[in-house]
Amino acid sequence: MRIGVLDILALPAQTRGQRIYCELMTRQYASVTPQAISVWCRRAGHETFYATYYGAGDPSRSLPEDLDYLFVSCHTHASPLAYAISRWYRQRGTVTVLGGPHARSFPADCLRWFDLAVWDCDHHLITRIVAGDFAPGSLVASSDTKIDFPSVAERMPEIRASAFDRRGRPFFATTIPLLASVGCPFKCSFCTDWDNPYRLLPLDRLDADMDFLAEHLPGTRVAFHDPNFGVKFDQVLDVLERRPRERCAPYIMECSLTTLRGERAARLERTRCVTIAPGIESWEEYSAKAGVGRHKGEEKVRRLIEQMLQIGRHVPYIQANFIFGLDSDGGAAPFELTGVFANATPHVWPTVNLPIPFGGTPMFDALRAEGRILEAMPFLFYSVPYSVLIYAHYSPEELYRRAINLLEQCCRPSLTARRLLRGHHLARVVHAVRTIGRRGEIRTYRRIHRMLLDDRQFRAFHEGSDTRLPEFYQQIFDARLGRWAELIPRDQRAPLLDPIAPEIVSAPAA
Ligand code: B12
Ligand code: SF4
């Protein structure tokens, strides 16, 4: 068989600045599972082609045109491009299969455009798909909870294709995706992993991968894609500490702040952790994972400022994630408290998110039951700074106005100067690049805010009293997809949000 695997990481870039960002940053977001599928198919003797699409170039040139099977992975906001590519390949006789975050969230919609959709998968399930065992229109999932991903050594052809420069060599941005665990013990209402139990993957595999990297790609950065890294902190860090610091790969990870108490931040430094991205999310909710017990509001701010200052002594770069417009929020307080936090922690990069109801989450179920999802909104707008729901305690105008004020406050010259004048030199470069990017982000927020003020139908749509998709969004859709937009006609852009259950497939007993 001729099998293609395409990991779609972005929509086509629109400006030169975006293209540079995609080449350097987005390109390094490649996921582990598509690489594993490519390895499994190669192992089975198929002629296998793997590529990522990160926003630059022509996605139809990434892979050969004549494929028997095409596996695609994407996030929801990039799904319209995935749908268009699937249509293009199906016209050429290829069987198309979608997996990854979007397929997990909205499988019914995926099956309008792909032959098959996949939830959890393993080697056995992929073999059965390629054997043609499932009827078109099926959603399938493996029952196996012991995921056996190929090692870094075995994934090297895929890593070379996704993360190396055009001459096939590692360069300063090269980042190797790794997993030490899957699942998470917390149950955040917006997260698709809320009901996926935490499982540590075999530690001897992690140890072997770190040795391989030290030997063959010394100094190359690793990104742990664990939903919540270091839940079993001592066990994972014991493995990383088995080699001297200079042989450790510098690494990036996401974890909850409750994990990083006491001496643990120092252990991150010893093992060369260079970036962490904890989710603070809100000053009113999600306090358990932030490790502040039942504290909320100002007390939560005070405690997390202290912790961020302490972690900042050991980890060069910290990104803190916030969500505004949750049902537990209202008025000016969430924004003001974040402003206080940002002012006291210039070394921390705050990201400003709006809630997005991804299918399969408690947030989605609650909002849909209350009729608060803007159902005409195409998936392309399931990403910041767009808004796809009706808020409990904010008008859309108020939410955007307050978000713009906060974003401006976070990159005002005095705070930016403090951010750029201290800390690790690489962190300062990243802060500088992100400050430029933030200006673009603010421009898009402003554009939407202006429309909310000036255009009555647009405002009515966002307040839920008019269900017609504003022309503004159709035009952005057309512009973002370029020539691919033709394959997704305007009347087919409203998504199908209904949940469906998968057929569970078990591997034969060993
Ligand atoms: C690591 C991670 C990242 C990393 C790496 C991204 C990447 N390409 O994987 C980084 C930090 C870059 C990132 C960025 C973003 N992320 Co992210 N991220 C995650 C996280 C924490 C873990 C995903 C993971 O690798 N899990 C481990 C794997 C093994 O498990 P899995 O994904 O469930 O995969 C299983 C199946 O789905 C299936 N499968 C997976 N892929 C494929 C592919 C094929 C072809 C098949 C057949 C099967 C298959 O097999 C696997 C094993 O059973 C999840 C949250 C979470 N808790 O899961 C969010 C998550 C995936 N991210 C999310 C989002 C929204 C984003 C951003 C848009 C955030 C932003 N505002 O910028 C960006 C977009 C990045 C991009 N352009 O690709 C959402 C996606 C929701 C959605 N439906 O789109 C999630 C689910 C978080 C959430 N809100 O719930 N993210
Ligand atoms: S802690 Fe992170 S991975 Fe775990 S449920 Fe919450 S958002 Fe998801």
Image: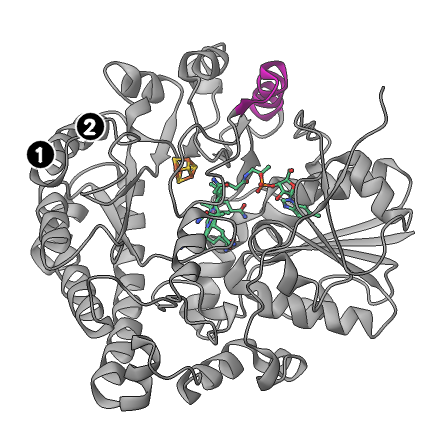
Say which label, 2 or 1, has the lower sequence index.
2
The image shows residue 354 at horizontal and vertical percentages of 31, 59
- Magenta stretch: give its range: 199-215
Q: Quadrant of residue 309?
A: top left
| Badge 2 amino acid | Val
| Badge 1 amino acid | Glu
Label placed on residue 292: 2
Label placed on residue 299: 1
Task: Inspect this view and state whether residue 10 appears.
Answer: no
Assign a secondary structure to mark 1.
helix
Q: Nearer the viewer, residue 104 or 59?
A: 104
Instruction: Tell me the colour scheme of the image.
Output: one colour
Q: Is residue 345 left or right of residue 505?
A: left
Label placed on residue 158: none
The image shows residue 417 at horizontal and vertical percentages of 12, 52
Please state, as top left, top right, bottom left or bottom right, where the C terminus lies in the image: top right
Circle 2 crowding by C-alpha within 10 Å: few under 14, some 14–19, many from 20: some
The image shows residue 139 at horizontal and vertical percentages of 72, 52
Circle 1 crowding by C-alpha within 10 Å: few under 14, some 14–19, many from 20: few
Assign a secondary structure to mark 2.
loop
Q: Is residue 318 left or right of residue 182?
A: left
Residue shown at the point (73%, 67%) measured from the top left: 86
Q: Is residue 172 left or right of residue 36?
A: left
Q: Is residue 395 above or below residue 231?
A: below
Mark-to-mark CA distance, 2 and 1: 9 Å
Residue shown at the point (44%, 85%) measured from the top left: 468
Q: Cβ(mark 2) to ligand 2 < 8 Å?
A: no
Q: Nearer the viewer, residue 488 or 47?
A: 488
